[in-house]
Image (cartoon, rainbow, N blue to C red):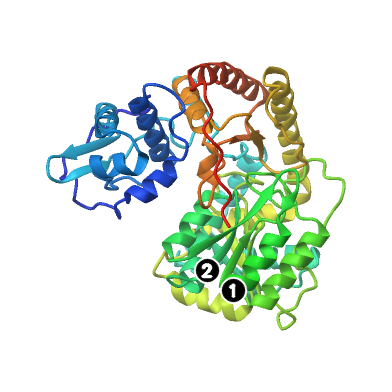
Amino acid sequence: TTPTATTQPSTAHPSADCHQPKSRVHLAALLGEWRTSEPAYEALADVVRVLCLDNRIAPRTALPAERELAAALGVSRTTVAAAYRSLRDTAHIESTRGSGSVTIPIGRTDLGRVWSADGSIDLQQASPPSWPGLAGVISDVAMSATTLVARSGYDILGSTSLRTAIAERYTASGIPTTIDQVLVTAGAQSGIHLVATVLVGRGDRVLIETPTYPHAAEALRRAGGRMVGVPVTTADGWDLDRAQQAFARTLPTLAYLMPDFQNPTGRSMSAQERAIMLDAAARSGTVLLIDETTADLNIDRGWQPEPFGAGHVHGDGARIIRLGSLAKTVWGGLRLGWIRADADIVRRLLAARSAHDLGTPDFEQAVGAALLPRMADILPQRSHVLRQGRDATVTALRSLLPEWGVPDVDGGVSLWVELNAPLSTNLVLDARAHGLHLSAGPRFAVDGGHEGRLRIPFTTTPSDLERAVEILAAGWHRVRSDAPSSAPEPYAAVV
């Protein structure tokens, strides 16, 4: 499998501007059960390719020496040398005698598009197409451009009109909010980075769901946080016993949670799960970072929960920071998000923000202020689009891949599918070679695992999703045929 773009290997010295090198132990853990096909060297190379494509190994990262990696994996040095040679041939790494090997940035011709020029389908981004009325709103806002450009153009807090609309929406949902409790950001991801920078110090414990939104974990790690994973599954929800123990024993500084239509599982917390999480955080003094970017993506959930922590007042227990965005509900290209927090936290975030960016563009804020009062019209249309995609995907999967565990989800953007073999990485590689781009299950793991899972977003058209499942079904047959006849022994229990 080769990169999808024509990016040429860098001529820079491999040791220049490298990321922190991967130790042999760290890389071995990322590789997991890599020996799922023959020849062994190509199976090893393929898994490294997926790690690069998923950004689990960042560009310009130094890889272990051949002898070190061979010892860690229990294979011959010849196998590792052949794998590295294969990776050089496909422009995934470059090597210099005496300096080792580093990964190369991999370009993509289809970046940011559902369809590329060659007709391939990109399901790495779980983002629906834009709301049909968006173009009209943008046109209306553009008519007031004279007023907009009369201002300075730097607004690190957020416009009064947009913050007022956000505060009113929270208040109507049962969370009384004033505009001094709202900070507008350039998308929810920007908000996660800002919160992590201000509240997480090097070595601080951060409680996080697993599987989870990978870019959140990356931001929290970059701030120096040490991840403490709490499992969440489509069938059983959050592991409350593990969560209570993690809060009590590790006293995390911050906990990142998605209570409604969690990405990637699509699961929503019950009232009991919300209460237990809130109480455990209060007891440990943990700040809760609640990601609500998918909270409005209800398809057919038959019950309407209160927003997480509604009625909770600081002083009774844990502090809550909320993240919102218009990326999933309106359009991913509208880079507009917000943070809702106590006023003193907003002031701390505001003081640190200028080191990251100088605010959110005025035009996008004006568009957002015009959109929020229309959410009663927008959300039913989003529900309809997502229902069509979900139903088409579920029907196709259960017809063509009946051996897979396909969950019933009532909202969100994706299915967290259970494969009946730990071959997610191999399947993603095969699918990519046949025009379908997905992220392997381990991409969403906190501490490894999920090789037997695959996230399948249902955010594009039903016909595209049906074709995607056909590609997966054909690929699954090939991958299973190439897999070794003897399955690896299960991991021993860890006490």
Judged from this view, the residue extending furthest toward the right is 302
Q: Is residue 172 left or right of residue 98?
A: right
Q: Residue at x 45, y 64 (%)?
A: 153
Quadrant holding the N terminus = top left
Q: Position of residue 400 (x, y in %)?
A: 68, 18
* Dot placed on the residue nearer the N-terminal end, 1 or 2: 2
Residue at point 64%, 45% (across, down):
330
- In which quarter of the view is residue 490 placed? top right
Q: Residue most toward the bottom?
A: 315
Q: Which is nearer the eye, 103 or 479?
A: 479
- Report crowding for label 1: few under 14, some 14 to 19, many 20 or more residues within 10 A (C-alpha): many
Q: Quadrant of residue 188?
A: bottom right
In the rendered image, the quadrant that contains the C terminus is: bottom right
Q: Is residue 40 above or below residue 459?
A: above
Residue 205 image label: 2
Can see residue 432?
A: yes
- Of residues 444 and 135, the one nearer the viewer is 444
Give left or right: position of 419 versus 85: right
Residue 333 visible, this orientation:
no
Query: At which x and y percent is residue 362?
Result: 51, 59
Say which of 397 and 244 sits in front: 244
The amino acid type, in three-letter code, at marker 2 is Arg
How far from the left and from the top, in percent, is residue 160?
61, 69
- Residue, x 66% and y 67% (percent of image)? 245
Between residues 19 and 386, which one lies in front from this camera angle? 19
Please report contact status of discs 1 and 2: CB closer than 8 Å, yes or no.
Answer: yes
User: In the drawing, does residue 76 fall left or right of residue 290?
Assistant: left
Q: Which disc number belongs to residue 251?
A: 1
